[in-house]
Image: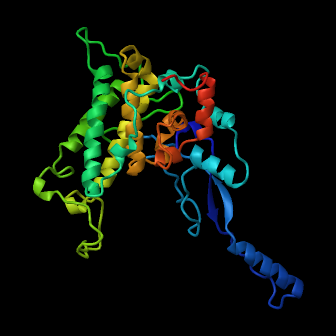
Amino acid sequence: MSNLFSGINARFRGQRSPNSPGTSSPSPEQQLAQAQAQAQAQAPAQHPGNSSQAYQGHQGSQSSSSNLAVKLPPLPTSPSLAETIGMDQASGMVPSAEEVLASYHLPPVKPLWLNANYAKHIVKGNFLTLSAKPKTVEMGEWIAHQVVDHWRMLITFIRLVHDKEEDGSSICNSRRCAKMSAGSNHSFTWLNSRYQPVEIPAYEYLTLVQRYITGKIDDATIFPTDPAGVSYADNPAFCTPLPESGQDWVGKRSGFPQNFMETCQTIFRQMFRVYAHLYWSHFDDMFSLNLEKSMNSCFSHFILTATTLNLLKKSDLEPMQPLIDLWAALGTFPQGSKAFEIANLSVGQLLIQKAGGPPAN
């Protein structure tokens, strides 16, 4: 969970130690008290826990339960904003759109990309048709294709802000972007040589991201390129069971390694962080270059792919949740898509209202 909501306490369930009876022949009143004590001992008790922060390096922080009783289960991570809202809805307390929007802690002057007039796309259509896996394509092959394709689109925007001009300057630099962030509420760290999360300038972060993702895609042990290894999706009527090796994973039939899905999720998480930084820190630059519609098109396609193929979790998307809400209300995300399901439609409609109504075509 982001540091925006680090004040939300997690809850974990434990067990109380039963009280032992004090006499060998208890009275009926004592028997009743013992029965109540045993019932309380069997019922789980709630204890407050410390909330943890995500977006710290490649792995989020985890709470430790080593100092707790052995019978206690491990501490879960703190609920994200969306999960907290879901808890309120389950209890009958549904927050208003204004309350949810306020919980995003947006700056007084909202980013330009939250104005519906600047959230337009360069093309019209349903991007979900480009994200959903065709029936005849094996899942590993389809995910690999999506990783390469989305990286090809994102690298164009990275180079616009990262590449140096003739005078040695760049749009994204250590003075303007002292750390890799997405607004004032979200910052991202990188693991150093000792696997410690450290804050680095956004320019350096973008350099490392390019090196990391390119290295993974070019690694034939992770993304095999031998055509002989290409497989097709199983036909339910003619499928042959996999060998009973006891293990199966996404992409196994096409020769992808066991950790392939985890690697792709990490790549998508890093790509999302880059998009988030571009929106929060360089959207005006894209607008001045007349490229905001192109980036909107690529990013909305990216969100649909990430959610459809389970490459990103809902909590991963928190820095850009307001834009997801807005696009859902504008119809960018079709109903029934996972991107539409994780959006808060009422917040999106409120953002449209604050911008003076739907954008003109």
Left or right: 277 as drawn, with respect to 214: right
| Up/down of 317 relative to 63, above or below | above
Residue at x-position 20% and y-position 49%: 223
| Residue at the limit of the structure toward the bottom, as seen here | 25
Q: Which quarter of the picture shows residue 251?
A: bottom left
Observer-nearest of 153 and 50 = 153
Question: Where in the figure is residue 324, as x and y percent of width and height?
Answer: 50, 37
Residue 175 can be seen in this image: no
Identify the image quadrant of residue 306. Answer: top left
Scheme of colours in the image: rainbow
Residue 158, horizontal then vertical, whole percent: 31, 26
On screen, residue 332 above or below 309: above
Farthest residue to the front: give it.
361
Residue at 63% in and 24% down: 354
Q: Residue 7's spot in the image, x, y percent?
A: 62, 41
Asked whether 143 or 83 is in front, the reply is 143
Q: In this view, does 11 lie to the left or right of 137?
A: right
Point out residue 138 in the picture as x, y percentages from the top left corner.
26, 58
The quarter of the displayed image where residue 246 is located: bottom left
Above or below, comparing residue 43 to residue 249 in the picture: below
Query: Along the line of sight, which residue is nearer the eye, 23 or 328?
Result: 328
Q: Nearer the viewer, residue 145 or 188?
A: 145
Q: How many marks?
A: 0
Q: Can residue 307 be seen in this view?
A: yes
